[in-house]
């Protein structure tokens, strides 16, 4: 049964998911390349990320498919290493994503299709804290900015949003983005899951840095 369920679904890897989400919110600047020579160092300043993009490696950390490149000395070594991982695992590649590094707080924003409530939106701290803290606020889609504020204040880690780590985050932008994202299922009712982890937020901007979307086939 699980195999049949997977067959009925379409998965968007990071590159496809971020292109889809760019119609609603800002995404980190990135470019998909196939060769090392295609990386334009006039457009991407160090440090930046290199990521394997393949439907066979949607969870890139499981294959060590994400590298932070600090300088020219690292670039070729990290790129060749990712190529070798892809070759060894026989991954069908879309390419390698060159992506800007953004400083800020890592958040997780998700949408799930619940069999009782329909689509719901989730908010919490992202990165390593997602599984450790299990601190998530949930609301039925769509939400307004007032609902988004309630979600923030419901989190145990809410002080992080108000400057507990030295910088106050742009909550107005976060609330606007939550409201926009929560409207996606209104036009895309076949979304089964959407995971943005992380969405990086600082005092000025907020951008999607990694994402995955699962659609039910219609």
Image (cartoon, helix red, strand yellow):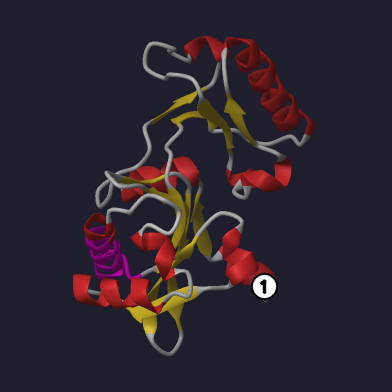
Residue 133 within the segment the image draws in magenta = no
- For the point 27% across and 53% down, the residue is 170
In the image, 68: left or right of 208?
right
In the image, 132: left or right of 147?
right
Q: Which residues are magenta?
A: 175-189
Q: Nearer the viewer, residue 194 or 75?
A: 75
- The percent coordinates of residue 167 (x first, y second) are 37, 50
Q: Is residue 171 visible?
A: yes
In the rendered image, the residue lying farthest to the right is 88
- The percent coordinates of residue 144 (x first, y second) are 20, 73
Q: Residue beneath label 1, please?
A: 2
Q: Quadrant of the C terminus?
A: bottom left
Q: Judging from the image, what secondary structure is the residue with disc 1 in? A: helix
Residue 181 within the segment the image draws in magenta = yes
Q: Nearer the viewer, residue 119 or 143?
A: 143
- For the point 43% across and 19% down, the residue is 45
- For the point 58% across and 61% down, the residue is 129
Give the main secondary structure, helix, strand or loop, of the magenta stretch.
Answer: helix
- For the point 37% across and 82% down, the residue is 118
Q: Is residue 216 visible?
A: no
Q: Nearer the viewer, residue 38 or 123?
A: 123
Q: Quadrant of the N terminus?
A: bottom right
Displayed quadrant of residue 165:
bottom left
């Amino acid at each position: 049964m699980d195999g049949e369920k997977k067959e009925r679904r379409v998965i968007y890897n990071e590159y496809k998911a971020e292109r889809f989400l760019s119609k609603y919110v800002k995404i980190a600047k990135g470019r998909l390349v196939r060769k090392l020579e295609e990386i334009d160092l006039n457009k991407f300043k160090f440090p930046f990320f290199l990521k394997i993009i393949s439907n066979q490696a949607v969870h890139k950390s499981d294959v060590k498919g994400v590298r932070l490149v600090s300088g020219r000395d690292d670039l070729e070594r990290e790129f060749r290493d990712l190529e070798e991982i892809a070759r060894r695992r026989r991954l069908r590649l879309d390419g390698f994503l060159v992506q800007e590094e953004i400083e800020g707080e890592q958040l997780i924003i998700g949408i799930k299709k619940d069999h009782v409530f329909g689509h719901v939106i989730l908010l919490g701290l992202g990165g390593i804290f997602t599984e450790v803290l299990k601190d998530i606020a949930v609301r039925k889609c769509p939400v307004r900015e007032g609902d988004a504020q309630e979600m923030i204040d419901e989190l145990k880690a809410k002080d992080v949003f108000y400057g507990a780590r030295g910088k106050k985050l742009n909550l107005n932008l976060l609330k606007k983005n939550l409201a926009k994202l929560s409207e996606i299922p209104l036009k895309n009712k076949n979304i089964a899951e959407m995971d943005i982890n992380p969405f990086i937020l600082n005092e000025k901007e907020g951008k999607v840095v990694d994402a995955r979307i699962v659609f039910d086939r219609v």
